[in-house]
Image (tube, rainbow, N blue to C red):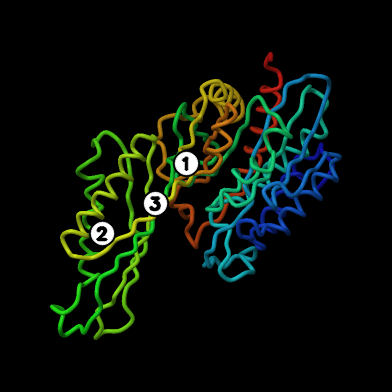
Amino acid sequence: MPAAGSHDDLQANLVQLRRDLHSHPELGYEESRTAALVASKLQALGIEVTTGLGKTGVVGTLRRGDSPLSVGLRADMDALPLTELNEFPHRSRHEGRMHACGHDGHTAMLLGAAEALSASRDFSGTVHFIFQPAEESGGGARAMIEDGLLERFPMQQVFALHNWPGLAVGELHVRDGVMMAGADTFEIHVTGRGGHAAMPHQAIDVIVASSSLVQALQTLVSRNVDAQQAAVVSVTRFNAGQTTNVLPERAELAGTVRTFTPEMQSALESGMHRICHGIEEAFGVTIRLDYRHGYPPTRNASGPVELCRNVAREVFGAERVRGDLMPSMGSEDFAFIAQAVPACYAWIGNGMIGDGAHLHSPHYDFNDDLIPFGVRYWVRLTRAALAESS
């Protein structure tokens, strides 16, 4: 990375870095190349580096002055198991792996902030640059916590950014309270009696029972949740049978549940057990429901939110700091950190959808125009957080 002071060179190098990361995506807990690159960049800046938290996580620690205050800035590093359909030169070189959520950009922006702050002497305190693995499904934040993240790197406040398609470049959205939903997963195993497809009366048809189960699960939200609240139950996998003339013995379903409160989470889980029992009685099948609690809702604390808003008004302009968007039913494992430390998670505009693609699309690409906004935001936020009285 270039010497601090040349903003054009810094921007150009960060774009090059981001595109290199995009070309070499790595899945959760496999981010060995990415982690090594991050650690090398931090070490070259004279920043203390700790590796191996949550298997492939990296923390860079920068200390200035004698203030006891400390702040954490977090970026995620992992890619998705998705085949990229873009044709630009920096497209993924690895079939079935793609940076389709912008974690390459998040990593580049945080490295840019680390460079700018490492060259600065105008703040006092400690900043921890947290580069996290396995956000997409592996719970990398929880793994880093279990490896001692919060004990080894104590922080009074912690912050995260995520790019957001549909929000204009140069805009930032942040709200008090819930930003992202909690995400649970489920698997349902349905067992009946297999038989000849021409003699269904001799079988117990798991496909008919499972189809009714899928339909019944949709009533959990449409007929059991207050229309002014939000929840999602989605069946995303339905496997049964192997040929055309055999009624299968078993079927498997799987999916996700998204909620904003523990109470709603509990109500939907109970409702799923109730519906499964009813389908058992109605069709004579046996059903086993495996319900797994995943990421909790991502909740922002009011103090960090106000700090973020004030800083964002300086960086983006007051008219471009928004708080009017509804929480997303997507999920984010930064929630585990936010449960333990006052936190703020914000969305930074990746451009309107007409100019690109949605998150998790095979046509998505991080918008490099975000990089200078993200770097300036991180730098000013760090200074502001460390200037607060303890």
What kind of residue is marked 2? Val
The image shows residue 326, relative to residue 92, as above or below, that is above
Badge 1 is on which residue? 167
Instruction: Give the residue number, with chain letter if any, for mark 2.
Output: 214
Front-lying residue, 111 or 14: 111
Q: CA distance from mark 2 to mark 3?
A: 15 Å
Q: Earlier in the sequence, mark 2 or mark 3?
A: 2
Q: Residues within 10 Å of mark 2 (few under 14, many from 20)?
A: some
Q: Amino acid at mark 1?
A: Leu
**Which of the two labelled residues, at mark 1 and mark 3, occupies the earlier sequence position?**
1
The quadrant the C terminus occupies is top right
Q: Residue at x 61, y 65 (%)?
A: 92
Q: Residues within 10 Å of mark 1 (few under 14, many from 20)?
A: some
Q: Residue, x 61% and y 33% (percent of image)?
A: 159
Q: CA distance from mark 2 to mark 1?
A: 34 Å
Label of residue 85 in the image = none
Taking 14 as reference, is 182 left or right? left
Residue 124 horizontal/vertical position (percent):
79, 22
Badge 2 marks a residue whose secondary structure is: helix
C-beta proximity under 8 Å, tags 1 and 3: no
How far across and down, in percent of the image, does residue 223 sit?
19, 43
Element carrying mark 1: loop
Q: Earlier in the sequence, mark 2 or mark 1?
A: 1
* Residue that carries the numbered disc 3 in the rendered image: 291
